[in-house]
Amino acid sequence: VHDRATDRRHFPVATVCRGDAQFQAVNSPLSEYAVLSFEYGASLADADRLFIWEAQFGDFLNGAQVVVDQFITTAEAKWRIPSALVVALPHGLEGQGPDHSSARIERLLQSCANDNIRVANPSTPANLFHLLRRQVLAPRRKPLFLIAQKSLLRDRAATSPLADFGASTAFRPVIAPVGVNSARLILCSGKICYALEVARREQVRDTVRIARIEQLYPFPAGEMRALLAAHPRAELAWVQEEPRNQGAWSHVRDHINDLAPGRALAFFGRDPM
């Protein structure tokens, strides 16, 4: 027998649901392979529920890589079994060490083909909200690898107005800059956009524009084609905090080459590691 007054005082989570809705927090063993397998199986058993497996650090996916390769990224092609599981992976060079800091975006993007999964790197609360909402409401179920930077939880610049959550709003695969015909168009993905914006304002570079690619796969070709057309003479640059042989660089480079043949895309980032 539960005393609701006591629950409200000592267990505020007990009051987050109304009516017949229920909320349960279940602790799990420290085995990425086992827990991700369970979450994937649960997503098949109940397609109308939002299942999110969130790793404490990006490299925790290493221990569950077999599940990713054998089931999450391939089950629909092999057995016609769809899933809407969300795999949330903290990512970003934030002082957590060479392993914890990386979700190995490059490894995930190498597994992308034939519309098998979604890989997104949202930089705003509204885009994160719409991503998760889409997982439940989308008519076609696809696993989502959610790249989520922990530092954005504390970054006051990473905010969204309430209007971005309202009616007629949706996930934005590309957050395009205001203006046309810039001298330089910087492409990036994730939290580095905020550091770039600060540098742009401090140097008063009004001819530089910064565009965020929020969905890495499927690549938003239509939005990017329109963006490139709006800046036909701009120098194109890709900026990332990851080393050159990691992150989304090679993935984005190939798509930009297809969309804008003949336009050079410069790389700015760390040396290969």
Image: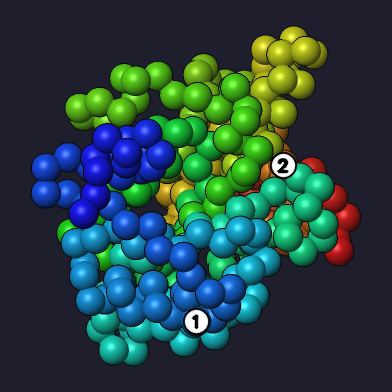
Which labelled disc corresponds to residue 239?
2
Q: Residue furthest left?
A: 20
Amino acid beneath label 2: Val
Q: Residues within 10 Å of mark 1 (few under 14, many from 20)?
A: some
User: What colouring style does the render use?
Assistant: rainbow
Which labelled disc corresponds to residue 34?
1
Residue 237 image point, x, y percent: 70, 39
Residue 101 image point, x, y percent: 73, 55
Any part of residue 267 in sight: no
Query: Who's the residue at 55% across and 53% down the image?
Result: 147
Amino acid beneath label 1: Ala
Helix, strand or loop for disc 2: strand
Query: Who's the residue at 17% across and 40% down the image?
Result: 18
Q: Is residue 8 above or below residue 113?
A: above
Query: Who's the residue at 28% across and 89% down the image?
Result: 79
Comparing marks 1 and 2, which lies closer to the viewer? 1
Q: Residues within 10 Å of mark 2 (few under 14, many from 20)?
A: many
Residue 121 image point, x, y percent: 53, 48
Query: Position of 36 compared to 108: left or right?
Result: left
Query: Position of 249 compared to 143: left or right?
Result: right
Any part of residue 150 in sight: yes
Query: Who's the residue at 60% across and 22% down the image?
Result: 156
* Nearest to N terminus: mark 1 or mark 2: 1
Query: Position of 208 compared to 65: left or right?
Result: right
Q: Nearer the viewer, residue 235 or 85?
A: 85
Q: Nearer the viewer, residue 162 or 12?
A: 12
Q: Nearer the viewer, residue 77 or 156?
A: 156
- In the rendered image, which quarter is residue 26 located in? bottom left
Q: How far, Cα to Cα, is label 1 from label 2? A: 36 Å
Helix, strand or loop for disc 1: helix
- In the rendered image, which quarter is residue 74 located in? bottom left
Q: Is residue 136 above or below residue 32?
A: above
